[in-house]
Image (cartoon, helix red, strand yellow):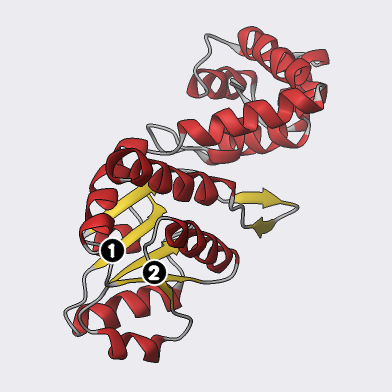
């Protein structure tokens, strides 16, 4: 597991970050591979902050001081040099962000209502929904993938599983509300504490952050596919 780089990307701290600390965090992330060769004075000068701010930011990241932070960054850089190590550690990181325990209730519900089940996803999550439908069909569960909000009204006695990596996509939230209006139970595979999770009867959730690449959000689906596979595997073990 990386000790520093993921913290710099996520920035989920126990307290609010000051403007000067944010400047240091930005500098550390942008110049990550250079940090082991820099002094605290150099980092303070180039980030337009102070040595006290550098040490305070180091403690925010969980280290005693800048020297300990540099050592941890050097370890991260060594791990990043191996391409296979990158993929392994990223996958391990994603796995640690999935609450596999929360799949149990969803699996029980899906099996109990296996003859009246709809699936919905948008964009990359639509591909995950189609994949889930195919895997369910192998188990003899004929789940229907719906692609339009109007379709919900035709299946009033069904339940719907909404797949959304962020849990904040407006069309997914609109579908959730429309389904609830016709007394349809809404289940979800989505992000922890998202609007979709909070509005669902049952939710299998993750806490994988949005992947940032040159300032553009890039939707990953590896965690969604892993979550779909978990549902299918549990169904196989428990009921088939």
Q: What residue would you read off at disc 2?
A: 143
Give the percent coordinates (x, y) of residue 200: 25, 62
Of 187 and 20, the residue lying toward us: 187
Q: What residue would you read off at disc 1?
A: 114
**Which residue is rendered at x = 28% and y = 52% of the image?**
106
Of 184 and 139, the residue lying toward us: 139
Secondary structure under tag 1 reads loop
* Left or right of 20 on screen, residue 146: left
Counting labels gives 2
Image quadrant where one finds the C terminus: top left
**Which residue is rendered at x = 64% and y = 24% of the image?**
50
Give the percent coordinates (x, y) of residue 180: 21, 78
Of 181 and 107, the residue lying toward us: 107
Q: Residues within 10 Å of mark 1 (few under 14, many from 20)?
A: some
Give the percent coordinates (x, y) of residue 21: 56, 33
Location of residue 52 (image quadrant)? top right
* Left or right of 147 on screen, residue 159: left
Location of residue 35 (image quadrant)? top right
Of 215 and 88, the residue lying toward us: 88
Secondary structure under tag 2 reads loop
Circles 2 and 1 in contact, beta carbons < 8 Å: yes
- Asked if residue 121 can be seen in this view, the reply is yes
Mark 2 or mark 1: whose residue is earlier in sequence: 1
**Which residue is rendered at x = 52% and y = 37% of the image?**
11
**Which residue is rendered at x = 28% and y = 63% of the image?**
114
Q: CA distance from mark 2 to mark 1?
A: 7 Å
Above or below residue 67? Residue 173 is below
């Amino acid at each position: 597991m990386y000790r520093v780089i993921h913290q710099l990307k996520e920035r989920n701290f126990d307290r609010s970050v000051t403007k000067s600390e944010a400047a240091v965090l930005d500098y550390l992330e942008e110049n990550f591979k250079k940090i082991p060769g820099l002094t605290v004075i150099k980092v303070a000068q180039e980030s337009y902050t102070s040595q006290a701010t550098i040490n305070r930011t180091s403690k925010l990241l969980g280290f005693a001081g800048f020297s300990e932070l540099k050592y941890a960054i050097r370890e991260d850089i060594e791990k990043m040099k191996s391409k296979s190590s990158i993929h392994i550690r990223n996958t391990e990181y994603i796995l640690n962000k999935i609450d596999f325990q929360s799949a149990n209730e969803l699996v029980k519900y899906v099996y109990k209502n296996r003859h009246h089940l709809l699936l919905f996803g948008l964009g990359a999550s639509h591909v995950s929904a189609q994949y889930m439908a195919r895997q369910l069909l192998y188990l003899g569960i004929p789940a229907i993938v719906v692609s339009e909000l109007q379709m919900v009204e035709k299946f009033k006695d069904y339940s719907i599983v909404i797949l959304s990596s962020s849990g904040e996509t407006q069309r997914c939230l609109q579908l959730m509300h429309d389904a609830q209006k016709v007394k349809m139970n809404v289940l979800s595979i989505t992000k922890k504490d998202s609007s979709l999770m909070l509005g669902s009867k049952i939710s299998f959730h993750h806490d994988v952050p949005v992947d940032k690449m040159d300032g553009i959000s890039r939707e990953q689906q590896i965690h969604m596919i892993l979550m779909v596979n978990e549902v299918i595997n549990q169904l196989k073990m428990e009921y088939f």
